[in-house]
Amino acid sequence: MTMTHTATHTARPAVPDMQPAPAFARLLLRMGHGMAAAVKRVQYGQMVAVLNQMTDEQLDMIGLPRRDIPAHARRLIYETA
């Protein structure tokens, strides 16, 4: 007895849309913004620390009164590209 095999081809389902779900995309976007904000806070803290370590003479040389350090650091970190 001879067996013959007939191939049956089933149609493959269409490739699903590879676009992320809108809710997932928004979640990733919020996470990215949160991480960027955290980096900025760290940079601000480091800038304030570095400037506070400078002597009054060094601060005078760059024209920065000690009382203006927080505002100056804020401008440098948050208001520049």
Image (cartoon, grey):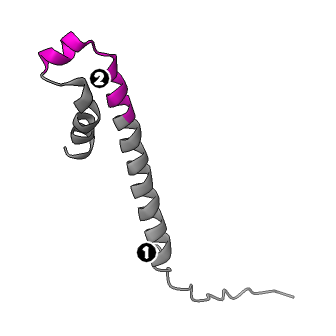
State whether residue 64 is above or below residue 7: above
Q: Residue at x 13, y 20 (%)?
A: 62
Image marks 2 and 1: residues in contact by CB distance under 8 Å = no
Give the mark, 2 or 1, whose residue is nearer the N terminus.
Answer: 1
Residue type (three-letter) at the residue carrying disc 1: Gln
Total numbered badges shown on the rendered structure:
2
Mark linked to residue 19: 1
What is the number of the mark on residue 51? 2
Question: Which stretch did the figure color magenta?
Answer: 45-62
Label 1 secondary element: loop
Between marks 2 and 1, how big is the CA–CA gap? 46 Å
Q: Which mark is residue 9?
A: none
**Residue 49: quarter of image:** top left
Tell me residue 5's x, y (percent).
73, 85
Residue depicted at x 44% and y 63% = 30
Q: Amino acid at mark 2?
A: Leu
Vertical order, 18 against 75 (above or below): below
Q: Position of residue 70 (x, y in %)?
A: 29, 35
